[in-house]
Amino acid sequence: MEFAPENLTLTKVLQASFQQLNDAVINRKSPMRCPVVATIGKNGPNQRIMVLREFDEDHRIMRFHTDFRSPKVDEIAKNSAISILGYDPEQRIQLKIYGAAQIYNESARATGAWLQTDTMGRRCYLCEPGSGTKISAAKSGLSKALQSRRPTIEETEAGRKNFAILMINIHQIDWMYLNSQGNLAASFHFDNNAWVGEWLIP
Ligand SMILES: Cc1cc2nc3c(=O)[nH]c(=O)nc-3n(C[C@H](O)[C@H](O)[C@H](O)COP(=O)(O)O)c2cc1C
């Protein structure tokens, strides 16, 4: 989509951003599907790539899946501030999203997400010990038997306790568009039950 400044509105930009995030959830080729997710770690900012599993524009929610034993879980428990960064080189759009994060391991929603995860996706949660554990030589943590095959549904059940969802309550979306005739930028804040946008010099 081309964005010419003459007849561009903040509403159009916000709707296009929502569309991009909705597409990221269903389109494996979308670069926004694997954004950078940044938390505040004990030594400052900490980033990692994660797969966007759900975007709900009405409730301003993003969902990611993660290992309940991974270091980010502890970081989020200590500081819920989170930022998500994606760039689509074809559309030349950068989205910076800010929100508050929460991790759920036992909730009904986490169970729902687990039920929707196929056996290959569930296999990550069968690694022992947990994500981030220091070990003496390179290894995945998967048992030898599971290294070369898909686990059975019964085998995956042991991974349920290690599976968690990361839910993000979005309160700001920053949009930036690269263009040879001049870049454009806008910022949207959720204030008093509505999105309020403003244009920025990029
Ligand atoms: C393409 C790609 C997709 C990834 N998807 C996820 C994901 O959906 N969830 C996740 O927890 N980690 C995912 N990872 C691994 C993370 O980037 C990170 O290395 C891991 O979660 C440990 O993060 P932490 O030590 O900050 O907790 C992915 C990595 C890559 C390269």
Image (tube, grey):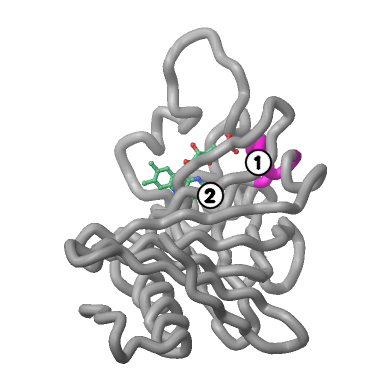
Outermost residue, right side: 78
Residue 86, percent across and down?
Answer: 40, 57
Pointer 2: what residue? Answer: 37
Pointer 1: what residue? Answer: 72
Whether ligand 1 has any atom under 8 Å from the Cβ at mark 1 is answered as yes
User: Could you tell me how far apart the alpha carbons at marks 2 and 1 are, in whole angstroms?
Assistant: 10 Å
Going 72% across and 56% down the picture, which residue do you hit? 103
Whether ligand 1 has any atom under 8 Å from the Cβ at mark 2 is answered as yes
The magenta-colored residue range is 68-74
Q: Amino acid at mark 1?
A: Lys
- Classify 10 Å Cα crowding around label 2: few (below 14), some (14-19), many (20 and above): many
Between 36 and 143, the one nearer to me in the picture: 36
Going 55% across and 60% down the picture, which residue do you hit? 64
Relative side of 195 to 76, left or right: left
Residue 140, percent across and down?
Answer: 44, 28
- Classify 10 Å Cα crowding around label 1: few (below 14), some (14-19), many (20 and above): many
Is residue 109 one of those drawn in magenta?
A: no
- Residue 105 picture quarter: bottom right
